[in-house]
């Protein structure tokens, strides 16, 4: 079987991608430093697929550790690189930690990927590279705007590092997937999002409020120039997102890519407001959510949702799940981990 390295493979999107890779018959090895994940996730993955992925706890900031890992895994044919810090607010407080953890590690991994017989690389990028785009839906040719946070900047710089390397190393084949807002959990409710501490993102805050861990959800502003006054985002089911990674990886492994650096927006193409997400949750859970309107959150863009034609027609991927499906899976997962 073809061996794939998934860095950050015990994280939210990483773990769901490992499941889909195993379902497609790939042999998976995971690197994770467990800074924002739990080794228990391995059990969840195995309980879904019946296959135990190889796992190595490793700090990718240690160059020598990265080098020795690849010495022991020369048969890797592709790398999906999720490992990074991703809390926007935290990145403002700790910029050097973010640049070190998100960029040094990318450089060390890329250097090793170039030494492999097959240099296929999938990069976890983000719609944050677009900032507040002028036109909706957002296409891949929309201008890259000045990042709103060090986190967003690490995604922009990360793409540039890969692009510049691909320009001089034709043997490197890379795809950057620009995610919109990943939400939900595997339908088995055996893996899902495990935010540490107070959730920064909307959907885990909603489910934790409904589970009684949080008293009340604050809706950050209802005075935006949108139909109901709340911000609009493109919420994509994490399993759909995971499947996009497998399709992108196969595109490279099977040499079907059109150039050696491609970017794709991965979203549903549907924009949903915060109030619409709350409404979807209340339908899924059959219970009303305790929320209040609060002041706007610094750095929030008004609206962001994907133009999906390139991913649909060239990558051959399309989101299958609706917002309601995703919210139902998020609630099922929350009930599972809280034994509700
Ligand atoms: C969504 C909407 C909030 C929490 C972030 C990262 C982005 C990507 C996805 C990694 C906004 C509102 C939120 C709350 C609220 N991550 N909200 N109350 O900010 O669109 O994107 O996660 O790549 O890089 O920036 O997601 O879930 O934080 O917010 O009203 O308690 O929900 O104002 O309008 P965001 P989010």
Image (spheres, rainbow, N blue to C red):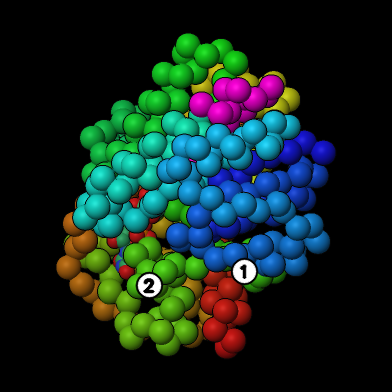
Local crowd size for mark 2, using a 10 Å CA cut-off: few (<14), some (14–19), many (≥20):
few
* 300 horizontally vs 282: left or right: left
The residue wearing badge 2 is 197
For residue 202, above or below residue 306 = below
Q: Residue 279: horizontal and vertical position, in percent? A: 43, 72
Residue 65 included in the magenta stretch of the image: no
Establish if 186 lies above or below 61.
Answer: below
| Image quadrant where one finds the N terminus | top right
Q: Position of residue 84 (x, y in %)?
A: 43, 47
Mark 2 or mark 1: name the one nearer the start of the chain: 1
What residue is drawn where x is 53% and y is 57%? 11
Instruction: Give the residue at mark 1.
Output: 40
Ligand 1 resides in the quarter of the picture at bottom left
Q: Does the residue labelled 2 lie within 8 Å of ligand 1?
A: no
The x and y percentages for residue 54 are: 70, 52
- Circles 2, 1 touching at the beta carbon (< 8 Å): no
Residue ID at (73%, 38%):
3
Q: Which quadrant would the C terminus be assigned to in this image?
A: bottom right
Magenta stretch bounds: 111-125
Secondary structure, mark 1, is loop
> Does any portion of residue 148 appear in the rendered image?
yes
Few, some or many residues within 10 Å of mark 1 (<14, 14–19, 20+): few
Residue 203, quarter of the rendered image: bottom left
């Amino acid at each position: 079987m073809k061996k794939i390295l998934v860095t950050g493979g015990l994280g939210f999107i990483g773990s769901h991608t490992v499941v889909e890779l195993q379902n497609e018959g790939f042999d998976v090895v995971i690197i994770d430093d467990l800074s924002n994940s739990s080794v228990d996730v391995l059990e969840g993955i195995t309980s879904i697929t019946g296959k135990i992925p190889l796992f190595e706890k490793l700090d990718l900031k240690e160059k020598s550790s990265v080098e020795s890992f690849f010495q022991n895994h020369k048969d890797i044919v592709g790398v999906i690189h999720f490992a990074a810090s991703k809390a926007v607010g935290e990145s403002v407080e700790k910029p050097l930690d973010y640049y070190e953890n998100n960029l040094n590690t990318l450089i060390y991994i890329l250097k090793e990927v170039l030494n492999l017989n097959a240099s296929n690389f999938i990069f976890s990028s983000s719609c944050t590279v677009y900032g507040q785009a002028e036109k909706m839906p957002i296409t891949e040719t929309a201008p890259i705007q000045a990042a709103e946070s060090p986190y967003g900047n690490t995604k922009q710089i990360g793409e540039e590092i890969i692009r510049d390397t691909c320009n001089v190393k034709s043997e490197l084949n890379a795809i950057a997937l620009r995610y919109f807002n990943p939400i939900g959990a595997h339908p088995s409710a055996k893996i899902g999002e495990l935010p540490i501490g107070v959730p920064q993102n909307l959907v885990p805050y909603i489910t934790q409020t409904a589970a009684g861990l949080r008293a009340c959800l604050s809706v950050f502003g209802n005075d935006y120039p949108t139909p109901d006054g709340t911000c609009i985002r493109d919420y994509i089911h994490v399993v759909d997102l995971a499947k996009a990674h497998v399709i992108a990886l196969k595109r490279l492994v099977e040499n079907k890519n059109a150039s050696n650096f491609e970017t794709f927006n991965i979203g549903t193409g549907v924009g949903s407001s915060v109030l619409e997400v709350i409404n979807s949750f209340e339908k899924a859970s059959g219970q009303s959510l305790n929320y209040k309107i609060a002041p706007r959150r610094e750095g929030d863009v008004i609206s962001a949702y994907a133009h999906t034609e390139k991913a649909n027609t060239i990558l051959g991927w399309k989101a299958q799940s609706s917002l309601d499906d995703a919210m139902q899976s998020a609630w099922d997962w929350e009930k599972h981990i809280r034994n509700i």
